[in-house]
Image (spheres, rainbow, N blue to C red):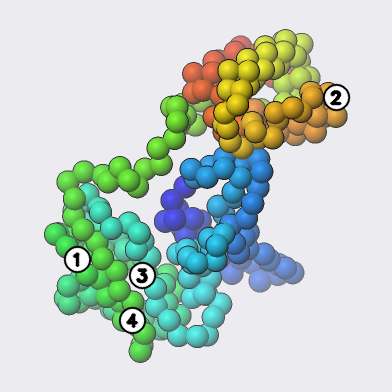
Amino acid sequence: YTEEYQAKYHEDVIRQIAVRPWLWSTHVWNMFDFAADARSEGGENGMNHKGLVTFDRKYKKDAFYAYKAWLSKEPFVHICGKRYVDRPENVTKVTVYTNEPSVELFANGKSLGVQKRGEFPFFYFSVPNEGETVLTAKAGDCTDESRIRKVDKVNTDYILQEEGAVINWFEIETPPGYMSINDTIGDILATAKGKLLALKIIKMVRANMKKNKGKSTGGMADMAKGMKLNKNIIEMGKGFSVKRVCMMAGGLFTKEQILEINARLNKIKKKQK
């Protein structure tokens, strides 16, 4: 996910917390990126990137400032999306966070208007995207600056390039009454056909691990090397969906293999509960 997506997610979290004052305790997950052996995402193995601040504590992500605008009394203003410089859209959305009562945004010195704070300290501006633009936000005595640039095509440097085809999870078919990779391993093993398919998947995993011997595929795949499959391991994994396992396994499964597994599951009727 992008830094923008994370910020929008936390904006919604803040809204949900705010309208539920009866909640006894609330928590943010998580302040900093942190080590997680089973993770293989964002082009970095062994790291969970859900933090509001990077692992090295050097970069505060936009979501950090959403909470600061909501909770802090120290005056400030922050323009989001500073790392998204090259933009192909003719009119681009710019989000500003501040705990001041109002904010004004300028594009190359020209005012794009003043917005007053509503229920939440999040401000959204539509900005004409032409050539090089210097954005300046002013809120009280605070200012912040950012730059955007009009481009004809999407800057591919902004797109994570991973080895092998990356699956679009929307491609997964989930026919009513039948299994899919969204079902848990436990539910799949509860059916006779599911058990047979599980054996085929285990063979596929072993073949892939043998093929990738000596190479790092990242995530859970590296953890699994040398691990013996036994009843305890299977029992522990019953609560995971097949999709979750595929995501955690990094490059252990190809896109075609995941689609093949899902297609086979689509032929297995769910057990009536």
Neighbours of disc 3 within 10 Å: few (<14), some (14-19), many (20+) = many
Which residue is more in the foreground, 126 or 60?
60
Residue under numbered circle 4: 143
Residue type, label 3: Ile
Mark 4–mark 2 distance (CA, rounded to whole Å): 60 Å
Badge 4 element: strand
Mark 1–mark 2 distance (CA, rounded to whole Å): 60 Å
Badge 2 element: helix
- Pinpoint residue 91: horizontal percent, then vertical percent: 21, 56
Q: Earlier in the sequence, mark 4 or mark 1?
A: 1
Badge 3 element: strand
Residue under numbered circle 3: 79
Residue type, label 2: Lys
Q: Earlier in the sequence, mark 4 or mark 2?
A: 4
- Pinpoint residue 273: horizontal percent, then vertical percent: 78, 25
148 versus 263 height, above or below: below
Q: Earlier in the sequence, mark 2 or mark 3?
A: 3
Residue under numbered circle 1: 133
Residue 102: quarter of image: bottom left
Residue type, label 1: Thr
